[in-house]
Image (tube, helix red, strand yellow):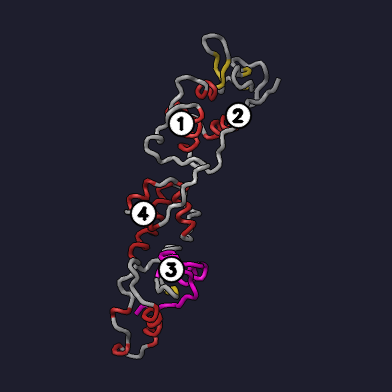
Amino acid sequence: MPNTCSACPKKFTFPETGSGICQSCNEFYCSECSSIGPDRTILCNRCRVLESNEANWDSVMGLNIRDLKWFMRRRNIPSVGLIEKEQFVDAVLNSLGISTRSSNAGDYVFPDSTKRNVKLEDLMSEESIENLSVRQIKDLLVYNFVDFTHCVEKAELIARAKQLWRNYKQQQPPIFETHEAVEVEDCQNAGTSSERCPSDKCPGDLNDECGICMEAPINCVFLECGHLFSCVDCGRKLTECPLCRQSIVRIVRTFRV
């Protein structure tokens, strides 16, 4: 007889009051992870919830992710692409034939879904980002080379995505033609104020923040499209413009005056 509970790391000496083998999954549990029903049968806490005819969103949500993954392994339920606990709960409830809270809202995407990734041009407003799943937001940030390694909460990912979307909208439509953008570099070398470039050619009204790292200032222009969107360090890592998807031939450093 094993002396380790299947649901927790607790070790004990058998027999222990209330401990035993679950009649549903046939695994051994301690008294804290199992209970005896009115018919004197022993059921573990997770089987008592998941095998119950009254299982619902709230009861399954009360289990931890470890228990949900255990149940999905037993039922051979695919878990590829699932990140948030709500997604695991939805997958479990769907396998039990129980309607989920998110099924009506349509915000759950199964792993085998063929829906394409969301792009910036697909978003109608900044608020529409809040309706995306965590996976869609991360794909959007990765596609636009935005670092989110230090983002833990979904709200932090949404904030990064909203900043990216604002930068994208501020760059539409293109402000400079290619030959005008190159002339910005000459502004720094002007000897007097009268020799400086006209105000309509200087990016004084642009957002200073790089649309990729969101830390350094915008200081380069993409050729041949002429968009200003990132700093030089981030621009060197790009193969195509995040705004128009045109291939980047080279980048030119710009200077603010």
Question: Could you tell me if the residues under marks 3 and 1 are in contact, i.e. CB atoms within 8 Å?
Answer: no
Q: Position of residue 177 (x, y in %)?
A: 36, 77
Question: Could you tell me if the residues under marks 2 and 3 are in contact, i.e. CB atoms within 8 Å?
Answer: no
Q: Amino acid at mark 2?
A: Arg
Closer to us: mark 2 or mark 1? 2
- Confirm whether the magenta stretch covers residue 1: no
C-alpha span from label 4 to label 2:
39 Å
Q: Earlier in the sequence, mark 3 or mark 1?
A: 1
Give, as a single range, the part of the protein colored magenta: 228-257
C-alpha span from label 3 to label 1:
42 Å
State whether residue 38 is above or below residue 221.
above
Question: Could you tell me if the residues under marks 4 and 3 are in contact, i.e. CB atoms within 8 Å?
Answer: no
Q: Residues within 10 Å of mark 4 (few under 14, many from 20)?
A: few
Secondary element at tag 4? loop
Q: Which residue is mark 2?
A: 74
- Confirm whether the magenta stretch covers residue 248: yes
Give the residue at x 48% y 29%. Answer: 93
Closer to us: mark 2 or mark 3? 2
Secondary element at tag 2? helix
Q: Which mark is residue 230?
A: 3
